[in-house]
Every structure is written in structure tokens, then in C-alpha cells.
Image (cartoon, rainbow, N blue to C red):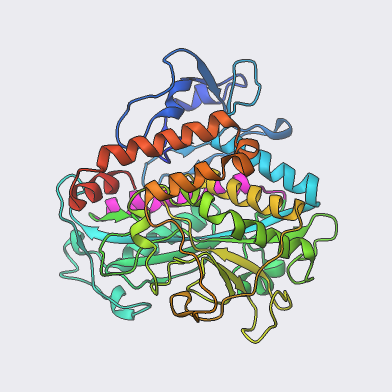
Amino acid sequence: MLWVDNANIPRCRVVPRARFERAAFKLELTSALQSVPSTADVAFNPPVGVVELSPDRRDGAEPTLYDISAWMPDTRAAFGDMRQPGGAAWNLCPRTFLRRQERKLRAELGAHATIGFELEFQLLHGDADAPPLAPVDSSLYAEVRAFYPRGSAATAATASSWDVLRDIVECLQRDLGIAVFQYHPESASGQFEISIGYYDDGDATATAASGSAACGPGGSLVDAVDKLVLARLSVHGIAAKHGLRATFVPKLRMNEAGSGAHVHLGLVDAASGANLFAARTATASAFVAGILEALPGMLLLLASSGNSYERFQASCWAGAFCCYGFENREAPIRLIGASASLPANAMAGVDHFEVKSVDATANPYIAVGALLAAGMAGVRRGAVLPDPVQVDPAAASSDRTLPRLPESLSAAIAAFEQSWDELWNDALSPEYAALLVRLRKYEEAQSADLPREMRLAQLMKRF
């Protein structure tokens, strides 16, 4: 049984299959587990109380089991929501938060979201417990050289990056049912990207060409994020089988590109199936405007470590300024499928949008749920997009000064607290919002006096 805690640490308990298959099977966990930071097993919440974790059983169906034998032999994994004794929803469960936002999207907007993810990570030689770690290569973006064989074919430890990526992608597609759109070397040393999501053969041209990834027929955003969690675990596990270390740390080297966890979102009318962006609806525009307005305060939920803010550098394709643009890869919000010649605020030709601010230190259920909450808040108040930014924001003309997003974890915490009453008290609940802030403040305090190398080593053990 897998769950991801509020500090974004995947955790599990392993049970014999015979016990799991009992209809009444459930685990009892101390509720304090969801108040533990990523740096140590120190719980903030009291040691009293339990929550129940049982596999999802929708409409009486059997639980979904995921085959993780590629890196954990003869094992299947399942997810479930954390509930209070008796079955009531529990406020501090990340999956429950995302599920609630998805239901609100359907109820308020009559829409469901399409979603896709980019997994950016680096492959390294060595062990995170004994740094420094050396990237497997120094190739350029999409350079074929990254896939060349290394060393002697008779030496298992010299398996090429191609061997590792091939095994990862095979696991994602064959074992986990995850659609892989593409994969390639990225800009930093030893860095690769795998784009995942849903598309079916009946509409593969439209969805795959745009990069948009729907949840799948009958699927949900919770299912999609479950698969994202499994994909990250598979990257770690399969790299380890090849004698390598994988890391999703946002900024490994200060003079190289960082690793994001970009989220691609679209909106589809639940009744007609129409793409609300392609139809140029006011709903789609206000949804993006809501996310843009909330972005400074929301950043804590999307990029949750001090290292995250080392990635947000100007002119590094990381989205350091609070803006959006048509196909502008320097903007944290990129409208995709549009021509740069379109007039301001037009949606013609737009298929969906990308949020570049997210990274793998953030809990993905919370991050996606926060994006939905901010977007819906924008629709409720009729938020209006400003003019798009069609240049590098760092080089924008002096008559349009663009605000920087928070440049440190402490600044992100302050921005979140300032926007607390506006959005997060309602979306998260005061208790949940306060817990997330407390976790990040504790983690920041624990690492504040450490040299960068030690902070990095600590993060690499977890992410």
C-alpha cells in the first residue's frame, strides 16, 4: 500500500496478498505520519489518533493493482485515500484534497481537466550516501551522444543511458499502463525528460500532437497523479538496478539547467467533450488568469524546497517572472498551440497550457489540486488575463516592469501566508494550510546553516 505524505515522501507498507484480498482489508496508521517533514521522522501532530488506509474500491470493483516487478520483484502496488475511523474523509490527505477539487471543477464549471506531466531527472554515478555524485554524461539538449554505449559491454555497471531509459519506458508502458509521449536528453549533464499522460488510438493524432494528456476514459486526476508517483519511483528503482542514481532535485549544478516537473493542463466540457481553449471560451481565459494571479502565493505548493528557488533564474527557461505568454518558454505559464502573432488575450489556436513552476519536491496531489483551486477562483470572479509577454521577461521594456516570483523558500512562505485568507483557507482548510507552512518552515530551519553540498546531499536522498 502506497501513500505520499505532505512532505512529498512516498511511503509504503507491504502486506501478503492473501491479507490484501480480504474485502475488509485496511491499514491503520498513526495520523501523526502526515505531519512529518522530509528531513527526519519528527511528527508535529500529537501521537494520539489513527487514520485508515484501504485500497480504492469504486462501485464495488476490485482495487487497481500496479505491477512494480521491474524494480521490486513479484510485487503489486495499490493506492487509497486516508480516512477517519468510520470512513469519513480526512482533511490532511493529499489525495482527498485533489479529489475534492476535481469534483468542484465538474460541479462549478461543468468541465473536467486534461493533464500530462514532464519527468525531468538526472542520472548519476555513485551513491547519495557518499557524495559527490557525477552525472553520466555532459551531453547537450537532445544530443544523440547521450545514448552511446559506455565502457565494455561485458561490464554491467557501464550500461548506457539508452539501456536505462528503454527499461524505464518499457516499465511505464507495459507494466503500469502509462502512455509515454516522448523521451530525450535534456540540457543539464546526465539529464533526461520523459513526457507522460493519456492518449488513445482513436484520437492519438489530436492529443499526442498537442502534448495534451487526458486522464483517460473513466479516469480521474487522482489516477493520473498516482501514475506520476509510480513513474518517479520506477525511474529511481530501475536506475538503481543499473548501478546508477536518479535524482529529480530541482537544481543540481548552479551553472546548468534545473529539473522541473512541468504540468500540462487543459479543460474539456463534460457534456459535449469540447476543448474549452480551442473554443475560445471566457472560462478557459479566466481559469488561466486565476492561476496567474495566485502564482506568487501558490508557489510554495508547487516548489517546496529551498533548492527549488535556485532553479528560478532569469533567462534560464525556468519561469522566474510572474507572467504568461503564447509559446514563450521563459514564462511560467505557457499557452500551447498558439501563434505569437495572435492579439492579446485571444485563445484561437490554443490547445492547453503548461505550468513550468512545479518541481518534484512538491506533493503532486497538492500541486495539481492547488492549480485547480486557483483556476476555479479566477472563473468565479471573472479574472481577466493581462497582455501576454512575447519576449524574455528579463528583457521586457522598461514601460512594463514584470514582478519576480518569490526568490527563496522563506519569500514563498511569506507570499503564501499573505494570500492565505484569499484562497487557501477555503481550498485547503486552515488546519491543512497551517500544517504545510509548518513543515516547510521546519525544513528550511534544519538546512539554513548547512553548506550547499550538504543541503543537496540531503535532498538527493529523498528526491
Residue 327 visible in this rendered orientation of the protein:
yes
Q: Main secondary structure of the magenta part?
A: helix
Residue at (37, 37) in percent of width and height: 441
Residue extent of the magenta highlight: 218-242
Q: Residue furthest bottom?
A: 341
212 lies above or below 112: below
**Which residue is drawn at the image coordinates 16% and 62% (left, top)?**
155
Residue 127 position in % (x across, y down): 19, 49
Q: Residue at x 34, y 35 (%)?
A: 442
| Front residue of this view, candidates 257 and 223 | 257
Judged left or right of residue 97, residue 150 is: left
Residue that appears at 28% across and 51% down? 241
Residue 257 on the magenta segment: no
Residue 279 position within the rendered picture, expressed as x and y whole percent measured from the top left: 79, 70
The image position of residue 188, as x and y in percent, is 31, 70
**In the image, is residue 171 above or below residue 186?**
above
Q: To which quarter of the image does residue 208 belong?
A: bottom right
